[in-house]
Amino acid sequence: MVSGKSREQTQRHLITMATFIVSTPDGKTSKNKQWTSPQLGLLLKCMIRKYTNLQCAQVIEHYFHGRTEGKAERVTHHVQSLKQEPKLKNGNQQLHDGSFATWIELHQVPTADVENINSNWADWTTLKTHEGVLLELLSTNSNQKGFDLRDPHSEESYYAGLLQQLIPTSEPLPILVARIHEAFSRFKECKPPLRDDAGLWKKEAIKNWIKAWKVEEGVAQIFENMATNV
């Protein structure tokens, strides 16, 4: 049986466009219902990655619509409960890479639930990595003019072309443009904002975003692969 850790490491580096900027929560409302193993396990993965409570809430909401509504306070109780499980901690009383496997054993989590958790986590990691790549492109090509003002998706089309060069995909360009448009919408919600009052992308804010979501390694890998293949 592949351990949770090794499975995650394997899936993290399968960077393809297939899961780029996918926003498909299950559509079922989870509010006021008891948390399930797939939800708690995904939360634990977030905690091991050292996400803030707000980030944890956003991840859970992405896959389980209505569970947290993206609010930090909606995960606080379960974060504290997981932190209070002594067997999940190392000698420094911290969660670590082996905490997930230990949690599975302690709670006898069904294999199907473990696979669901690992799949969602790999998907989320890829999602944020691809968004990080897009933001790096926005930062690198920051504020250049020349987009066709008659085309409302001119900017998205331009960056879709760049992304096709970086991340393998068989998807039609219009689909990719639509997904980048969705990403732009999410970027508008970021706090602190990623653009200044004039609408120009802020390099330092983008750098901090990539660092906050812990995707520096994945983003760097994609650009390194591009440089190697040139």
Image: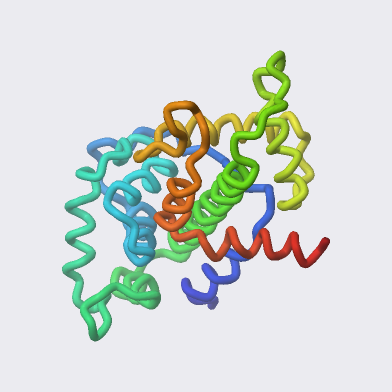
180 or 145, which is in the foreground?
Answer: 145
Where does the image place residue 77, in percent across and percent down from the top left? 17, 52
Rendered image quadrant of residue 138: top right
Which residue lies most toward the top here?
150
136 on left or right of 77: right
Which residue lies most toward the right here?
230
Task: Write the residue at 71% across / 31% down.
Answer: 157
Q: In which quarter of the image is the C terminus?
A: bottom right
User: Quick check: 183 above or below 164?
Assistant: above
13 or 107, which is in the foreground?
Answer: 13
Task: Write the residue at 57% across / 62% down.
Answer: 218
Where does the image place residue 155, in percent across and percent down from the top left? 66, 29
Where does the image place residue 187, in percent across and percent down from the top left? 47, 36
Task: Write the residue at 32% across / 71% down.
Answer: 103
29 or 131, which is in the foreground?
Answer: 131
Please say which color scheme the image uses. rainbow
63 on left or right of 89: right
User: Quick check: 117 above or below 85?
Assistant: above
159 on left or right of 101: right
Which residue lies most toward the bottom here?
91
How many numbered discs sit on the rendered protein?
0
Rendered image quadrant of residue 173: top right
